[in-house]
Image: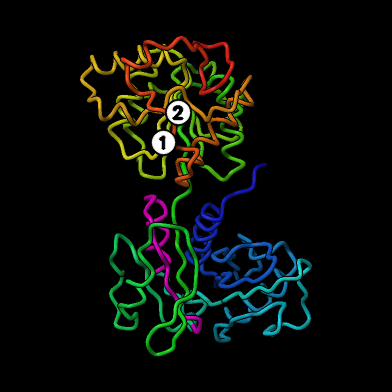
Amino acid sequence: MPEKSTARLLAESFHYARQWIAKGQGVAIATVVGTSGSSPRPPGSTMVIGSDGRVEGSVSGGCVEADVIHAGRDIIDGAPPALLNYGGAEANRWGVQLACGGSLAIFVEAVHSLSSPAGTFSADLLDRVVRGMDERRALALLRTLDGAGHAVVADGLMVPESDRVPPEIVSGAGGPESDRCFRLEDGTGQIWFWQGICPPVRLIVIGAVHIAQTLTAMGAAMGFETIVIDPRGGLATPERFRDAELMVEWPDEALAELQIDTRTAIVTLTHDAKLDDPALGVAVRSPAFYIGALGSRRTHAARLRRLQGEGVEEQLLKKIRGPVGLPVGAVGAQEIAVSILADIIAVRRGAPLAVREDWWSPARTSALTDESCVAGSEGEFS
């Protein structure tokens, strides 16, 4: 089973927290707010603790969980919020050691509810965060490390508006457009923790083909949310795609149903114009940060001419990376999948490898004879 991303773990943990509260349980939220040296989990990693002992999420590799759970249950029962330090000179939990040798700071507070009337994290704020994550919105959760101040920043606005959150905290962080997590100090010396919450990168693959099996498995292992679209039910089966959501629909119709955003990558793999072309027509008009199409340069040139004939503007055609993938000489499904994922990462990170020759032009590509289906590969597809 691939490791889940921090964003997915957070979403699942907060969903469980809401369910437990609805059933009358008390809930504490433990969040990694600082690390130094080697640390098993990054800042922003979250664990929720129920009054019945249930736990979801993680704040370490297991070396401090038991102590954090014990503290969380005390806080559910009325103890004040606590900043727990493990390892290093400032450690206040002397009985627990970090095997990695680093240090870890974890903030624990209870959600305000009938079971935890002293809780400092409001249930309404929890609902707002969960709704935002369900809608794949970029958010930032702000908290003071004493539990007195809370807010959510979404679309540049603070919700709810509060006089307790100094404007320099919101403006100084640069907006909730990344999953960065860090501490900020306001003009009074109060420390705030900014927890960026971005939806996971979503990889949408058109075509339940052999390459797609490897591509989605690798993508899921990287924490991507993977979706495979193919109207051919005999190919799009759970047995063949254990790490992906399946949509047995025509690709253009399925893409219209999905919330394609700036954290979405779309790759067409079918080599069937009836499936790939309509999907690309939708993709290029979307805000997807990556659009790639399998096929040789000559095949890609023919594809672009067809799309132009369907009324797709030349400027939009430039968004399609074809042949898909980085030019690493890929051979076979596994290497092709690696080259595609490497290209997606390069584009996402703005790496120099993402810049390559202008292959989009039909006039240029039609004059080329390279029949490989992936950039720089020796594949047999055209």
Q: Is residue 160 above or below residue 296?
A: below
Left or right position of 155 against 73: left
Q: Is 149 colored magenta in this rendering?
A: no
Count of picture labels: 2
Name the foreground residue: 134 vs 44: 44
**Residue at image x 27%, y 30%?**
316
Name the foreground residue: 11 vs 114: 11
Q: CA distance from mark 2 to mark 1?
A: 8 Å
| CB under 8 Å between discs 2 and 1 | yes
What's the residue type where badge 2 is placed? Answer: Val
Query: Which residue is the site of mark 1?
Result: 290
**Residue at image x 48%, y 42%?**
352
- Quadrant of the image for the N terminus? top right
**Residue at image x 49%, y 10%?**
382
How did the renderer colour the structure? rainbow
Task: Looking at the image, tell me whether mark 2 or mark 1 is earlier in sequence order.
Answer: 2
**SS type, badge 1:** strand
**SS type, badge 2:** strand
Query: Which residue is the site of mark 2?
Result: 267
- The image quadrant that residue 366 belongs to is top left
**Residue at image x 32%, y 16%?**
362
User: Label 1: few (<14), some or many (≥20) within 10 Å?
Assistant: many
Q: Is residue 66 above or below residue 295?
A: below
Q: Is 131 colored magenta in this rendering?
A: yes
Write the start and end of the magenta stretch as one range.
125-146
Q: Is residue 258 above or below residue 106?
A: above
- The image quadrant that residue 365 belongs to is top left
